[in-house]
């Protein structure tokens, strides 16, 4: 007996699913895919002509083909019709309609472009954060997740993270790990980063059209694609493929989905270049001159970058991340006017002129995870963590221990000179026996190297702390309890943001030079060199703005860990731990901004837009101004709970029932 046929009648752009017994047939345009037996490869035809499933696309243009894609999919391309479809390899989940289907076809709104679509039910995933960089996975992800969880009406939060160790670290740092959903992120800067909506050949893989390459990226990121289709709002830190997820979300939900981009530093590159050029003809003020001298190897012009990349065999057209500035501008150009560009700057008030243009910039300080503890509580908690391995450090952060403290962090970001940074700090520690040095972070190989160094030459005032993950903000806040303390870090924005959110002035190591000693340029080094050089100048501007009434030498911003003058570096570090210097820097930080509210600001805007759609940019800026007003308590006092307020509840929600002031 033949089972009755069931035919679904979807919207016109939806593929048909025809069920006959155990057989399933899908069709879209001239493409027809039939699964005669569950768990077996399908039969594929285009315009009635059968197609085998190959391993690579054909060399000839205009030919329909089918190729294996990712671990579980098949890409079918009808080039004559400018249509491509991504279908499951075995079809076992199709009868219950559990597997979404993905397609690319001509964009009716833009000639010469294509759009990505999804067909099938997708569950809501709340806010989606595409977190490529390590600083985002350990800074933004736990901070924004925690702030969202503390809102009166929390929304789900999903993070896409590339490395498993970063995902594990983000979960450990999250305030409620059970509420943080993590999906894998897979990409290749020399392949998927070059995919654009232009319906032309892909520059990295010319045998593929961009519409086909987009589906291949989805095939490698099926779980992320499903999360993207159901996302109520999407935040992109710097992955150029995020536009694919945004198109999926808008097609699946038939509405405008808010899109946020996180950027930093690149708008200040021209200013820093001008400053470096002027320094050659006229002597700058003392503090800036020292910063320029230590940062000079990292400061490069556009032409110098192009020449260095060319000499190293790196083509920015095929590896976009090598040119951080150009890649950032490209991501910004793709953002809709209704989107949000969270531009992070240490001296964010000095950069508000960026908001005068047509792009939807919302200037904010760098984001960090603030401890809920006051300095004295954090000192006790950090001491208890230390005492688990080193009993003599139990009271290190309390008045019972007279030693100063230098917390030295390299994070896990890329540096070709990480060991040279640490060698310099070890040399300085040998000259500062009255200060206990805690070496934190670093890659597994660098930590093993440092452990061997300490085994060969033990130093009583040096401790290899390693990774403390969920205790990191506690250690930073504990520094506030010590009058003689310093936080020395590589000049990454995640380290700076975490320090500022906890009321701690960061002392930056030198930015890595653009070129290696042999003259070659690594693509990752090129991406971060100029960016890292900017932050010392931002900190200098913050102190200059906040401490203008205090005469004296400039406050320490950068310790030259790559220079040859170790004595000068020693003088800088010794000055940085002096109580009067620490007091001035901490007061400058506390008076500039309510740093601990940055995560709550972003969470409140995300939550509102996830429910009600994109807010006008001016409203988001007004919310920013209200959220970040300085309260009278210092940021180091642990301001998570203020009298008469709910912890973590945004200021604008405390003043009115409307989720955003001035916007009904």
Image (cartoon, rainbow, N blue to C red):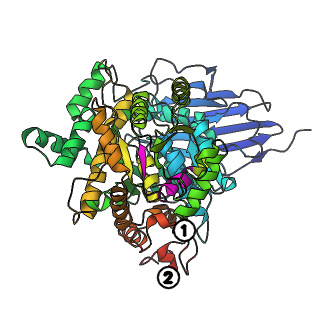
In this view, the residue in front, 253 or 290, is 290
The reply to whether dot 2 and dot 1 touch (C-beta < 8 Å) is no
Q: Which residue sits at x=33%, y=39%?
A: 570
Q: Which residues are magenta?
A: 472-489
* Left or right, residue 485 beside residue 640: left
Q: Which residue is mark 1?
A: 640
Does residue 232 show up? no
Residue 172's x, y, as percent?
Answer: 64, 48
In this view, the residue in front, 116 or 419, is 419
List the single residue furthest toward the right: 1
The vertical placement of 661 against 281, above or below, is below
Q: Which residue is mark 2?
A: 656
Q: Secondary structure at mark 1?
A: loop
The vertical placement of 369 against 164, above or below, is below
Alpha carbon distance from label 2 to label 1: 20 Å
* Left or right, residue 663 beside residue 36: left
Residue 641's x, y, as percent?
Answer: 56, 72
Q: Nearer the viewer, mark 2 or mark 1?
A: 1
User: Between disc 2 and disc 1, whose residue precedes?
Assistant: 1
Quadrant location of the N terminus?
top right
Q: Secondary structure at mark 2?
A: loop
In this view, the residue in front, 91 or 618, is 618
Q: Residues within 10 Å of mark 1 (few under 14, many from 20)?
A: some
The disc label shown at residue 617, or none: none
Does residue 345 show up? yes
List the single residue furthest toward the left: 281
Residue 153's x, y, as percent?
Answer: 61, 70
The vertical placement of 214 against 135, above or below, is above
Q: Which residue sits at x=38%, y=28%?
A: 523
Q: Which residue sits at x=22%, y=44%?
A: 272
């Amino acid at each position: 007996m033949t089972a009755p046929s069931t035919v679904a009648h979807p919207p016109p752009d939806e593929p048909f699913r025809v069920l006959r017994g155990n057989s399933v047939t899908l069709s879209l345009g001239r493409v027809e895919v039939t699964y005669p037996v569950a768990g077996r490869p399908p039969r594929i035809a285009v315009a009635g002509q059968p197609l085998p499933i190959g391993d690579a696309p054909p060399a000839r243009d205009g030919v329909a083909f089918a190729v294996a894609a990712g671990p579980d999919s098949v890409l079918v391309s009808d080039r004559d019709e400018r249509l491509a479809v991504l279908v499951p390899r075995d079809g076992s989940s199709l009868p219950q309609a559990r597997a979404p289907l993905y397609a690319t076809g001509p964009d009716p709104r833009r000639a010469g472009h294509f759009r990505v679509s999804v067909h099938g039910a997708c569950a809501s995933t709340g806010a989606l954060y595409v977190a490529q960089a390590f600083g985002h996975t350990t800074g933004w992800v736990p901070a924004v997740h925690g702030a969202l969880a503390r809102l009166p009406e929390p929304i789900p939060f999903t993070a896409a993270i590339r490395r498993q160790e970063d995902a594990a670290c983000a979960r450990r740092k999250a305030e409620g790990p059970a509420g943080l959903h993590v999906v894998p992120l897979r990409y290749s800067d020399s392949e998927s980063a070059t995919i654009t909506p232009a319906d032309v050949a892909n520059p990295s893989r010319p045998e593929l059209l961009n519409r086909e390459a987009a589906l291949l990226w989805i095939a490698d990121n099926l779980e992320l694609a499903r999360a993207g289709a159901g996302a109520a709002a999407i935040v992109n830190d710097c992955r150029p493929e995020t536009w694919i997820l945004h198109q999926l979300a808008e097609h699946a939900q038939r509405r405008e989905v808010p899109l946020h981009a996180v950027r930093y530093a690149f708008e200040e590159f021209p200013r820093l270049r001008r400053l470096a050029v002027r320094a050659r003809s006229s002597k700058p003020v003392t503090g800036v001159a020292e910063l320029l001298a230590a940062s000079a190897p990292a400061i490069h012009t556009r032409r110098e970058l192009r020449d260095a990349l060319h000499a190293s065999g790196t083509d920015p057209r095929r590896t976009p991340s090598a040119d951080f500035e150009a890649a950032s501008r490209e991501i910004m150009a793709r953002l809709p006017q209704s989107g949000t560009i969270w531009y992070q700057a240490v001296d964010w008030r000095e950069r508000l002129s960026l908001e005068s243009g047509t792009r939807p910039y919302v200037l904010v300080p760098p984001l960090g995870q603030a401890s809920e503890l006051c300095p004295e509580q954090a000192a006790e908690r950090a001491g208890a963590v230390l005492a688990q391995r080193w009993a003599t450090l139990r009271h290190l952060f309390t008045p019972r221990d007279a030693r100063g403290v230098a917390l030295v962090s390299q994070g896990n970001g890329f540096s070709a000179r990480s060991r040279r940074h640490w060698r310099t700090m070890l040399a300085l520690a040998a000259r500062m026996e009255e200060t206990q040095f805690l070496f934190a972070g670093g890659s597994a190989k660098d930590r093993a190297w440092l452990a061997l160094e300490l085994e060969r030459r033990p130093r009583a005032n040096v401790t290899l702390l390693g990774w403390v993950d969920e205790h990191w903000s506690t250690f930073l806040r504990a520094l506030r309890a010590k009058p003689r303390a310093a936080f020395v870090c590589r000049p990454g924005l995640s380290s700076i943001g975490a320090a500022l959110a906890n009321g701690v002035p960061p002392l930056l190591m030198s930015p890595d030079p653009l070129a290696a000693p042999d003259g070659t340029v690594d693509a990752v080094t090129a991406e971060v060199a100029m960016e890292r050089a900017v932050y010392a100048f931002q900190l200098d501007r913050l102190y200059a703005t906040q401490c203008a009434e205090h005469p004296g030498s400039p406050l320490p911003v950068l310790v030259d860990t790559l220079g040859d003058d170790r004595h000068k570096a020693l003088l800088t570090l010794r000055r940085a731990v002096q109580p009067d210097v620490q007091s001035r820097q901490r007061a400058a930080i506390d008076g500039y901004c309510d740093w601990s509210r940055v995560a709550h600001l972003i969470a409140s805007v995300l939550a509102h837009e996830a429910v009600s759609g994109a807010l006008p940019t001016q409203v988001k800026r007004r919310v920013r101004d209200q959220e970040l007003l300085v309260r009278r308590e210092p940021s180091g006092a642990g301001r998570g709970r203020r009298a008469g307020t709910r912890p973590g509840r945004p200021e604008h929600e405390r003043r009115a029932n409307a989720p955003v002031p001035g916007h009904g």
